[in-house]
Image (cartoon, coloured by chain):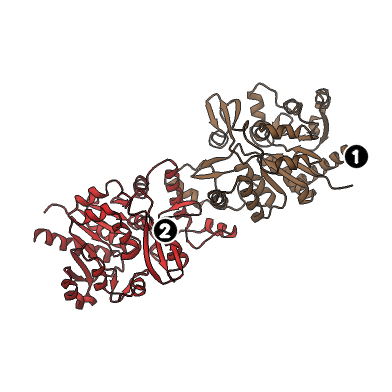
Chain colours: A brown, B red
Amino acid sequence: MRDIKIVGLAGGVGGAKLADGLAQVLQANNLTVIVNTGDDFWHLSLYVMPDIDTVCYTLAGIANPETGWGRINDTSNVLGELKKMGMPDWFKLGDADLAIQLVRNIYLKDGLSLSQITEKICKKLGVRVKVMPMSDDPVQTWVYTTEGDLEFQEYFVHRRCEPAVKGFLFEGAEKSSPAPGVLEAISQSDAVILCPSNPWVSIDPILAIPRIKSALQTRKVYAVSPIIGTETVKGPAAKMFQELGIQASALAVAEHYKGLIYCLVIDNIDRNLESDINAIGIRTAVTDILMRDRADRKRLAQELIDLISNDIKG
Amino acid sequence: MRDIKIVGLAGGVGGAKLADGLAQVLQANNLTVIVNTGDDFWHLSLYVMPDIDTVCYTLAGIANPETGWGRINDTSNVLGELKKMGMPDWFKLGDADLAIQLVRNIYLKDGLSLSQITEKICKKLGVRVKVMPMSDDPVQTWVYTTEGDLEFQEYFVHRRCEPAVKGFLFEGAEKSSPAPGVLEAISQSDAVILCPSNPWVSIDPILAIPRIKSALQTRKVYAVSPIIGTETVKGPAAKMFQELGIQASALAVAEHYKGLIYCLVIDNIDRNLESDINAIGIRTAVTDILMRDRADRKRLAQELIDLISNDIKG
């Protein structure tokens, strides 16, 4: 059989892990990872792209395994000095991580687009699969909370996701265009995988770009549930479901993606939800979806590819 | 006698040393240091002010004593990573030094002027005397050389002053305004001291701002020779005189500043030049002008203040 071409949609840590699994089982030119940029922000005078960095560092094998974000064995000399100068240090940019921000900002000053910059940084970091920001246009995720409207990183990192969420805005998404190559990658793919990133703030910003959303509707879209039981492995997804009045579960994820996804991959412990998910028109696949290490990522990715291959042969 | 108010004009290392000496002998509010900004440049996506930093670090007691520029005990983690990413590393920005550049760029993004930013950074670094950029407007020093026209830092750091100079341009100086407070500091001063910085590329850019030049002409201006014998302590001043067809000497410095300065302070070994310098209408004072350590800086500064006091009483 010919090689399967996959597009993955990803946000931060969970999405990056599955992207790494897919990169382990697919030829580099058969995988494109489209990454949320709604969490980009200007910080310490620099344009920072946290999700893009997490995906790139993970794919390059240089991510900090303790945190999932940032770079392994990094130091914090600059941040320490900045703190002494009264500057905010809540966003933990290590020195090597800061170097990547400077590289990005050097290219920005040279007039390069976010997608051109991402391509250059990936090349220098040795990332072989294609990583693309969802858009070269500015999109800003806002989190509406009981304590006011917060820019995403302000909510996520500075406020540690503590304020209860009421809703979200992806400012600029409606009129933004997919980055060059995004629609082509989708249209040439055999399947699209929504990686197990936060549906509300990692995947939804990507779906908020109208031409990406409509391109996805022409494909078979698979999602890996970011919820196992009633919890997320990392991050506030389960907390957000609760705060929005929805019981966090794989079924809630299915409801969230209803009309878009063909199949939801859920964890063994959620097997009992299969019939409810199927009842809303979404197929299910059941396996161990927790990615504890690189081998787990590869195993899950291989199972996904096998599933998709069978569906294609179907 | 009432306190003497001094304005010092300074560029990099030599000027910073005398500024430190003056700061040791004068009350903080009696000293203003006006610093060259013609060597400012955009580098690694950041606005960098090398002379301002050298003066501030020296006055804060955090300058690297080995080099005269940069910060003491600094690390180079970010620059090391940038080099791996293919970025230029010829401008040796240490991590703590880089933190200062980020602070400046954060304030720039906030809309602050160069003089407002300098004031804030000085305060945070514990610099008590007033340090001002010569202007808030952009001025760019160009060095015309036998190998083409080079931006100052390209000539000075990247090319290590190797190309032979043919002339200089202070682009933007003609139409730039003195930074707020510069003219007031000059008009309220008892004397202005041209610190022993490079006449061609440290002091001349300041003098190229028309309203600073004319303000100085209302004051008694003293200069400390940056040339001892036929050499400079540091930097390319002597080499520049030679390449421009002028024998480097304290007399050449006197000729350079003729019409502007009242008195030139020269080294003991140049005592024989006194009559020639006096003959072109410039007084002389003779002492040990080499500043080997902080005590030397203080001694020379005290001698200057004594000289000026006597002239005022005179």
Quadrant where the image shows the C terminus of chain B? bottom left
Whether residue B140 sits left or right of residue B207 in the image: it is right
Which amino acid is tagged 2?
Arg
**C-beta proximity under 8 Å, tags 1 and 2:** no
Which amino acid is tagged 1?
Lys
Above or below for A79 versus B311: above
| Residue B229 location, quadrant | bottom left
| Residue B171 location, quadrant | bottom left
Callout 1: chain? A
Marks 1 & 2 on one chain: no
Residues at marks 1 and 2, CA–CA distance in whole angstroms: 65 Å
Disc 1, SS: helix
Density class for disc 2 (Cα within 10 Å; few <14, some 14-19, many ≥20) is many
Q: Which residue is mark 2?
A: B71
Which of the two residues, A288 or A21, is positioned nearer the viewer here?
A: A21
Residue A238 in view in this figure: yes
Whether residue B116 sits left or right of residue B220 in the image: it is right
The percent coordinates of residue B301 (x first, y second) are 23, 62
Whether residue B113 sits left or right of residue A10 in the image: it is left
Q: Which residue is mark 1?
A: A313
Extreme-bottom residue of the structure: B272
Q: In the image, which is nearer the foreground, mark 1 or mark 2?
A: 1
The percent coordinates of residue A198 (x first, y second) are 67, 34
Q: Give the residue drawn at x 76%, y 38%.
A: A193
Q: Give the residue drawn at x 21%, y 67%.
A: B264
Disc 2, SS: loop
Residue A292 in view in this figure: no
Q: Give the residue drawn at x 32%, y 53%.
A: B134
Q: Which mark is residue A237?
A: none
